[in-house]
Amino acid sequence: MKIGKVAVAATLVTTALTLGGVATVASAAVPTTTTVTAKNPLGNTPGKVVITGKIRPTTGTGLPTGTCTFVVDRATIGTKAVNGRGGCSLTTHLKLGMHTIVIRYGGSAIFAASRGSTTINVTQ
């Protein structure tokens, strides 16, 4: 029976350390901003849209790493790695009309998660 009690105590300690570690990392992470642009290039395939995100720390220096998730009209359309310049890009095709585009930066051990959004009216 002592073994069972020890195992439960160890699980509780591990959980407490995990929760404490997450809270510590999240509170120490450098805040970021995500800027989103979307372009419907002229002379290209109808509905072609290039979506670009720039992730920057709000204080200090450095370039965030990790991934960006691209969402159009509340539907996830892809995930891309943040490049060496702190950006991410995705080319897609959208129906004609207004669309809301969101990029969610997932954060890293150093940089906090952030999101940005824009709208685009696809006319060609």
Image: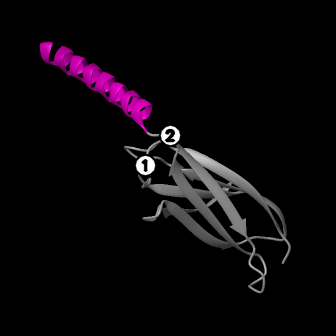
- Res 81 label: none
Give the residues drawn in magenta, as a range. 1-29
Does dot 1 land on a helix, a strand or a loop?
Answer: loop
Q: Quadrant of the N terminus?
A: top left
Q: Between marks 1 and 2, how big is the CA–CA gap? A: 11 Å
**Residue 6 lies in magenta, yes or no?**
yes
Magenta residues: mostly which secondary structure?
helix
Q: Residue at x 41, y 52 (%)?
A: 62
Q: Which residue is mark 2?
A: 31
Q: Is residue 20 above or below residue 28?
A: above
Does dot 2 land on a helix, a strand or a loop?
Answer: loop
Q: Residues within 10 Å of mark 1 (few under 14, many from 20)?
A: few
Instruction: Name which quarter of the figure residue 118 lies in.
Output: bottom right
- Res 61 label: 1
Q: Nearer the viewer, mark 1 or mark 2?
A: 1
Q: Position of residue 80 (x, y in %)?
A: 51, 64
Q: Is residue 3 visible?
A: yes
Side of 38 where 86 appears, left or right: left
Q: Is residue 41 above or below residue 54?
A: below
Q: Which one is in front, 95 or 8? A: 95
Q: Position of residue 79 (x, y in %)?
A: 53, 61
Side of 118 where 70 appears, left or right: left
Q: Is residue 73 visible?
A: no
Of mark 1 and mark 2, the one earlier in the sequence is 2
Side of 2 where 85 appears, left or right: right
Q: Which one is in front, 48 or 74? A: 48
